[in-house]
Image: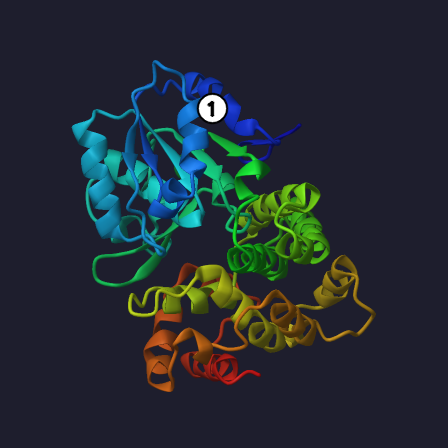
Amino acid sequence: MALITYHNQMDIDFGAIERIGAALKKNGISRPLICTDKGIVDTGIYDALRLALPNDIAATVFDETPGNPTEVAVDAALKLYRENDCDGVIAIGGGSSIDLGKGVALKASHDGPIINWSAVRGGRDKIGVAPPIIAIPTTAGTGSEVGGGTVIVTEDGQKVVIASPYLLPKIAICDPNLTLGLPKHLTAATGMDAMAHCIEAYLTPVINPPAAAIGLDGLERVVKYLKRAVDNGQDKDARWNMMMAASEGAMAFSKGLGAVHSMSHAVGALPELGAHHGTLNAVLLPAVLRFNADHVGNKYEKIRRAMGLEIGADISNWITEFNRTLGLPANLAQMGVTEEMIPALARHCMTDACHFTNPVQPSVEQYESLYREALNAE
């Protein structure tokens, strides 16, 4: 067992879910709202949590988390939270369920719409104490279990970033057993989300050497273990290392993220597409890396070393080929994005929190060009 205290405490171990009772007791939670989705319930993963809960815990379940968590869903879960006099949140699932759980904790303790607390409106400095959250990831990608950030689609269709130390889960219970049945395409997509986090966090101009080092270590793990996890979902060594890489990606992005995430947030806000965040990051990463190349000093040299590439190797081309071997889409067109959507998507990027920590901030026209490059990639 590795017990790591960075932003929060992370319990990573096969069978770690059995310690949920101790985590609840430590944080004074006896009536949790469990935030999850139908897939977690239908596949039986929720049963592992249910069986591990002590008999004296009175839990309420919200299992309607959408693929991209919305304020509407947060409000529906919040209604259950208040009706059942809940005193904390257990979020079990992928990043969507964990992000939704953070949204519930925020709105349970703060009045007003989600947009009021967004990062671009100075929400970080306005958010105060919130109910305790325990996060149990069932994918290895977002790292939301060790971060204080959440991304929610507001009622008016904006996908906004909210960040506060008060939304950081008290404990992250990271049990790789819960990822053994993850389908190949989700293993690949969530794993590339972790890669994007590690790379973008490392490239931001924010100075945070520990976070930068963690990002490079996470990147090395993704390159070494993601394909193994995709090829053999029962590879426990690969699953453990990918769960660690996912958490490391989130630890690293305390430095911030960049244009890849600004662009994926914009597309992810379109309900008609239902585009998966990690898959978007994978498809967008090569184009943004080419755009950033002249603005990052010698950082690509360290990225190449972490990835095990030769000196001067083209990182963007390598990632494009890696996406192909993982069975991910080659371009945005395959994900339903059209040329007509690009102007509005580019404008959305300009107000996304991640835009401001890219190595160089793209203009609207440059975002349009990046979208077209990713739209037509082969």
> Residue placed farthest to the right in the image?
311
Q: Is residue 338 visible?
A: yes
- The residue lying toward the viewer, choosing from 345 and 279, is 279
Which of the 4 image quarters holds residue 360?
bottom right
Asked if residue 4 lies left or right of residue 351, the reply is right
Q: What residue is pinned by disc 1?
A: 20
Expressed as whole percent of the image width and height from the top left, the position of residue 135 reads 45, 35
Between 64 and 350, which is closer to the camera in this rendering?
Answer: 64
Which secondary structure, mark 1?
helix
Picture layout, residue 262 above or below residue 336: above
Residue at the image position 20 percent from the left and 40 percent from the top: 111
| Residue 287, picture quadrant | bottom right
Q: Quadrant of the N terminus?
A: top right
Q: Position of residue 91 (x, y in %)?
A: 39, 37
Residue at 39%, 76% (x, y): give it.
Answer: 336
Q: Mark 1 belongs to which amino acid?
A: Ile
* Left or right for 162, reference 78: right
Task: Name the residue: 44% across, 48% down.
Answer: 95
Q: Is residue 289 above or below residue 366?
A: above
